[in-house]
């Protein structure tokens, strides 16, 4: 049976200039508001399913005691990157700048409004194709043009995520 959770994704732009400050504010706000919130680089996230699958895999990893990270937020980054090392995962799929990023959160409307206020951000619906860099996705997930002849980019990324950590 699937885990019960309600997640939403948003494309957020903020007037904060420093990514470290953004991450610090995000962590503090998520803790105070009792919500899950994580930010991603929009150039390598292929769809909502990419992030929702990462969240489900992270939840399962914690449940099974097979998590690589100490927090669910970090584990979601690890899973979204199809990685086993947190630093590598952050480099691959973590938000790189404050000009625009994808926010994955379970915040309701009130919490989201407060979170955006703290981040000095404006949110809009995610349109993945407008920010996606296919060549960067291919490099990030080690995908080839030959693979893409038979499968969608999304399917290949989801498969990489599912297999991550299970290779011998």
Image (cartoon, helix red, strand yellow):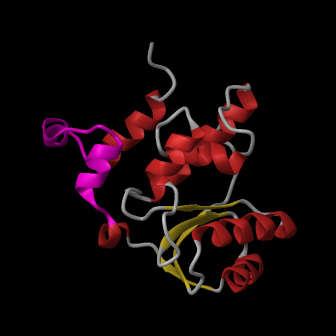
Taken as a whole, is the magenta stretch helix, strand or loop? helix
Of the pair 2 and 56, the residue shown nearer to us: 56
Residue 87 position within the rendered picture, expressed as x and y whole percent measured from the top left? 56, 43
Residue 8 position within the rendered picture, expressed as x and y whole percent measured from the top left? 59, 66
Residue lying at the far top of the rendered structure:
168
Q: Quadrant of residue 15?
A: bottom right
In this picture, which residue range is highlighted in magenta? Answer: 132-153
Of the pair 65 and 18, the residue shown nearer to us: 18
- Examine the rendered structure and indicate whether residue 25 appears above or below residue 52: below
Residue 138 highlighted magenta (yes or no): yes
Q: Is residue 107 visible?
A: no
> Is residue 27 shown left or right of residue 129?
right
| Tag count | 0
Residue 32 highlighted magenta (yes or no): no
Residue 35 position within the rendered picture, expressed as x and y whole percent measured from the top left? 77, 63
Q: Residue at x 28, y 45 (%)?
A: 139
Residue 111 position within the rendered picture, expressed as x and y whole percent measured from the top left? 76, 76
Q: Residue at x 68, y 51 (%)?
A: 73
Assign the C terminus to one quadrant of the image. Answer: top left
Assign the N terminus to one quadrant of the image. Answer: top right
Q: Residue at x 71, y 68 (%)?
A: 26
Q: Residue at x 78, y 71 (%)?
A: 29
> Is residue 95 shown left or right of residue 26?
left
- Examine the rendered structure and indicate whether residue 46 appears above or below residue 1: below
Q: Is residue 30 visible?
A: yes
């Amino acid at each position: 049976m699937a885990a019960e959770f309600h997640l939403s994704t948003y494309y957020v732009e903020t007037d904060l200039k420093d990514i470290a400050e953004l991450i610090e504010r995000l962590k503090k706000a998520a803790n105070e508001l009792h919500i899950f919130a994580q930010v991603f680089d929009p150039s390598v996230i292929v769809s909502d399913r990419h992030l929702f699958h990462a969240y489900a895999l992270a939840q399962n990893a914690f449940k099974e005691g097979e998590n690589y990270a100490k927090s669910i937020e970090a584990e979601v980054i690890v899973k979204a990157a199809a990685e086993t090392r947190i630093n590598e995962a952050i480099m691959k799929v973590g938000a790189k700048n404050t000009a625009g990023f994808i926010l994955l959160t379970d915040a309701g409307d009130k919490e989201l409004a407060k979170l955006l206020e703290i981040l000095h951000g404006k949110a809009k619906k995610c349109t993945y194709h407008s920010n996606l860099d296919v060549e960067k996705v291919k490099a990030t997930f080690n995908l080839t043009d030959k693979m893409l002849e038979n499968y969608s980019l999304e399917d290949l990324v989801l498969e990489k995520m599912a297999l991550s950590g299970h290779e011998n």
